[in-house]
Amino acid sequence: MIHDRPRPIGSRPTKQLPRRFTSNGVGSGAREHLPPGLRSAVLILATVACGWLLISGAIARTAVSAAAVGAPKATPATFAGTWIGHTRLLKITRTGYAKEHINAGCCDPVLDLWFRLSHVHGTTLHASVTVRVTKVHVLDPSAYAPGYGPPHAGETRILRLNNGVIREPLTQTSYCDSTAETTGACGA
């Protein structure tokens, strides 16, 4: 039955509950109509069903991320260390501060960039983190084409880590850990 009272504009009609149910979740005595032995069986069955629903929900949540099976949850320390790319270096502290240095070739420094990591998601194998630029020092402005300037302080992006390779979106570069570096994933 729909409420007959006027309702505010934009609100949806609500159904009124049958009389045997109340707003506090307690029934009006529908169970009393069952024989005593059947009442116990219904209660046990309901308890078991609720338990199975909780367990199946936990299993489903776990199965959502198959990559996460066995891998610990990512933290800022997941990204900590020295990451290497051809003519570039990224150092990240365990507390989430980072400095990136990029060269153009062996002897032409282009950019020093500092940023802060926050909001880590994922596992130690597959993780993402928000980075916010805190300081930029352009060492060679001629390295940037018109309309494609360096990152600026306050800029934020999502940095991703997959199997030892960091994809850094501010400078569109990749960095490897010592294992991934041997595969050549981060340059010559």
Image: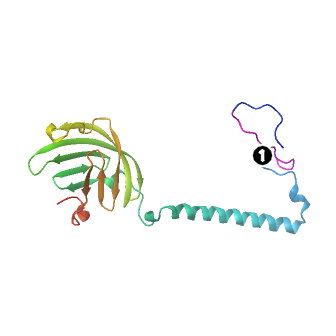
Q: State which region is magenta.
A: 10-21
Q: Is 167 covered by the magenta stretch?
A: no
Q: Quadrant of residue 57?
A: bottom right
- State the quadrant of the C terminus: bottom left
> Who's the residue at 66% across and 66% down the image?
52
Q: Is residue 142 above or below residue 173?
A: above
Of helix, strand and loop, which mostly describes the magenta segment? loop
Q: Amino acid at mark 1?
A: Asn
Q: Residue 94's spot in the image, x, y percent? A: 31, 50
Quadrant of res 183: bottom left
Taking depth in this image into account, of 32 and 188 the one nearest to the observer is 188
Q: Secondary structure at mark 1?
A: loop
Q: Is residue 34 above or below residue 141?
A: below
Residue at the spot 25% in from the left edge and 65% down from the top edge? 179
For disc 1, the marked residue is: 24
Name the residue: 29% across, 44% down: 170
Q: Residue at x 91, y 60 (%)?
A: 33
